[in-house]
Image: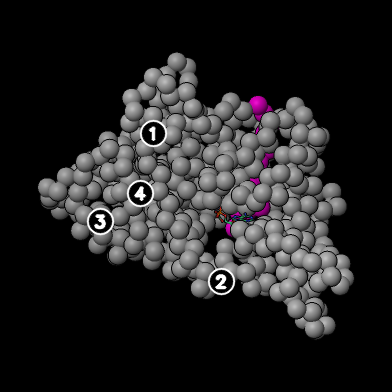
Amino acid sequence: MKLLAIETSCDETAIAIVEIRHKQHKNTITVLSHIISSQAPIHAVWGGVVPHIAKREHQKMLVPLLTHALRESGHRIPKKKITLSEVLQKDLDAILEREPELAKHLHDTPGLFHVPDIDAVVVTNGPGLEPALWVGVNFARALSKLWGKPLFGINHMEGHIAIAFMRENIQKKNMPLKQKKRHQYTISTITYPALALLVSGGHTELVLMQKKGVFRIIGETRDDAAGEAFDKAARILGLGYPGGPAISLEAKKSVSPTAIQRPILLPRPMMQSRDLDFSFSGLKTALLYLVRDLEKHQVRVRRIRPAIAKEFQHAVVDVLVAKTLRAMHTYNVRTCILGGGVAANAELRDRLSHKIQEQFPRTTCYMPPISFTGDNGLMIAAAAYMRMQRVSSRKTKEAMHAWKTLRPDATMRLS
Ligand code: KG4
Ligand code: ZN
């Protein structure tokens, strides 16, 4: 079975094409194409993601990326023009009414009218920025209608969980050379209860899975997400966007002890509270006051910026690790997963895995490779694959008509 996965929930336009095979009681996922086009440099000028610019860029990139992905996955895109029936053209026009630029790109690329060797189209339909989600969802609806393929909407956060379970299969000894070059994965078997710490630009949540496919949010942020806190802190410190990688990099630089005249201390909000919720907005405000205070006392903030970045990162990681361990104790967790863009943070990865090893030696900890922590199409394909193992054939039949009804849900929750 081949899946085309589309992800446009924030500022990455991403497409993946994967092939899923069932062989010797084992399912393997072969990546045929995996492309991400990041808009980060465009949004950096504004200091954060601007929704209408994200929408415009997704419209611009989807058709070229799909063409590239299909070619990379071995499809020949014929030049021969196909004339669509009037009814089909009308349906496509209606689907892409809100995305005129995307509609034009598709119309001008008739090679895409030929039906490729794809069995289903899967797309992120929430949570995320609504204008950005609409573009991906409507593109997926158009392709599903055009090619007569089933369509599935996938929760973005489920994608961040699913990709953590992908294990690279390195036994490719007897494969033809062409396949050897392709990355192949298996999905690890999970022991329940499992807990996921999901940390991204829009979310910070602890998700409990008592069994396969059943999700319960047992803790979440009451204000800013961890990634958002990194982004806002980076802006205060003049470090640019995206803030997470910039803060980590800055924290690694050393500062001479004589430059720091007094200890730099930031709060660990809600770390001692008995619940499993988070709050990062106060930490950002404390950082802002600290910087203002230093400036008032004529301290050159730039000189001690690495020490400030280090303390900020330390504060966020302290809270995330403490709450995750608390949840693990409470729910007797057997598998722990780290996911989302902030999962790229080396200090978070190191400290969380170290603490789990120390305090829960029988718990398995899954973290995606850093290259898979940010938004991508592969995570949506992985979540779709895990979901498809659970859906009935009736649902698969319904998916043939989902192009009529699928809508984004910007505030979608895992449940
Ligand atoms: O999951 P993601 O790619 O997009 C959303 O779904 O939001 O997460 C993006 C977030 C950004 O806020 C970014 O600053 C943060 O992940 N991030 C990091 C690091 N790399 C990316 N935060 C901390 N440390 C990093 N190394
Ligand atoms: Zn994400």
Q: Mark 4 points at which residue?
A: 140
Q: Between tags 1 and 3, which lies in front?
A: 1
Label 2, secondary structure: give it. Answer: loop
Q: Which amino acid does label 3 sit on?
A: Leu
Label 1, secondary structure: give it. Answer: loop
Q: Does the residue labelled 2 lie within 8 Å of ligand 1?
A: no
Residue 231 horizontal/vertical position (percent): 62, 64
Q: Residue at x 67, y 49 (%)?
A: 346
Side of 123 relative to 63 (left or right)? right
Pointer 1 or 3: first along the chain: 3
Pointers 4 and 2 in contact (C-beta within 8 Å) = no
| Residue numbers of the magenta segment | 191-205
Q: Between tags 1 and 4, which lies in front?
A: 1
Residue 114 in view, yes or no: yes
Q: Between tags 4 and 2, which lies in front?
A: 2
Side of 364 relative to 170 (left or right)? right
